[in-house]
Image (tube, rainbow, N blue to C red):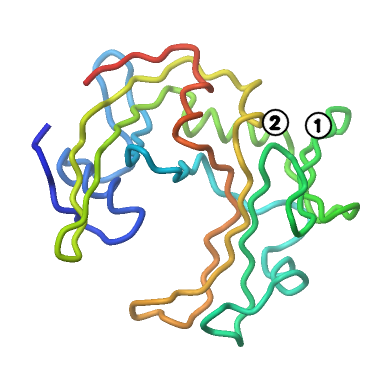
Amino acid sequence: MKGWIESNRRHDTGIGKTLEDHLGIKENNIALPDFGVMELKSQRIGTPSMITLFTKSPEGITNAEIRKRFGYPDSEFSRIKILHQTIDNGKMNSMGFHCKITEKQNKLFIMKKDEVLGFYDLDFLKQKAIEKIGNGLILVLAESKEEDGKEYFHYEEAYLLRNLDLSKLLSYSKYDIRLGVYHSGKNKGRFHDHGSAFRIEERSISKLFSLRKRIL
């Protein structure tokens, strides 16, 4: 593409915002003549960072209640409780959080050991996935480097991903609870609810689709 491009935004979201700005698009999608509007995602090559599929709080409990019950003091702002938890393929993590799918009830339950905290309707999750990436996905990979405190990107590869297989959605995605605090900027020291998200590693995103075609 254009060689090394300076990031238009600091931190993780810079790679996507910079790409969108250079493509001249305002939303996180791109229109292709033969395929219509598709979700646009970008990823740093060689990093374990995650792609967010969609964000939605569970039914039956609020994030505020989860933070109140299970949160712990932030390392810098001890007066504020935070909670960062990742549930991988339903396995119980170190704090006892895990997911449990009950096909008969058609629900995915968010658990703390043996206690049900909240739930998602499986049909809802599938519908959200269809709305977000059901039409396909353009995945752009880029090298990144830092110079003089600034990050630069070289967008090198792009893939067209089509034909979403919903049966694989929950097998490869991870569930994140992201209740934190701003550590810089004008909101420094204030609580921030990033939401509860279903996310997936870049290296696994293509496994959700039966068609993967390199276009750059």
Q: CB under 8 Å between callouts 1 and 2?
A: yes
Residue 194: x percent and y percent? Answer: 52, 61
Q: Nearer the viewer, residue 76 or 210?
A: 76
User: Is 31 placed above or below 213 here?
Assistant: below
Outermost left residue: 2
Residue at 33%, 77% in the rendered image: 185
Q: Nearer the viewer, residue 93 or 115?
A: 93
Residue occupied by mark 2: 123
Is 25 on the left-hand or right-hand side of 28?
left
Label at residue 65: none
Q: Quadrant of the C terminus?
A: top left
In three-dimensional space, the C-alpha distance between marks 1 and 2, rounded to whole angstroms, equals: 7 Å
Marked residue nearer the N-terminal end (1 or 2): 1
Residue 62: x percent and y percent? Answer: 71, 63
Residue at 64%, 35% in the rendered image: 125
Is 165 on the left-hand or right-hand side of 156?
right
Residue at 63%, 23% in the rendered image: 168
User: Tag 1: residue type?
Assistant: Asn
Residue occupied by mark 1: 106
**Is the residue marked by circle 1 packed among few (<14), some (14-19), or many (20+) residues within 10 Å?**
few
Q: Quadrant of the N terminus?
A: top left
Residue at 16%, 41% in the rendered image: 24
Residue 132: x percent and y percent? Answer: 48, 34
User: Tag 2: residue type?
Assistant: Asp
**Is the residue marked by circle 2 packed among few (<14), some (14-19), or many (20+) residues within 10 Å?**
few
Q: Secondary structure at mark 1?
A: loop
User: Is 69 placed above or below 175 here?
Assistant: below
Residue 182: x percent and y percent? Answer: 45, 74
The total of numbered circles placed on residues is 2
Q: Secondary structure at mark 2?
A: helix
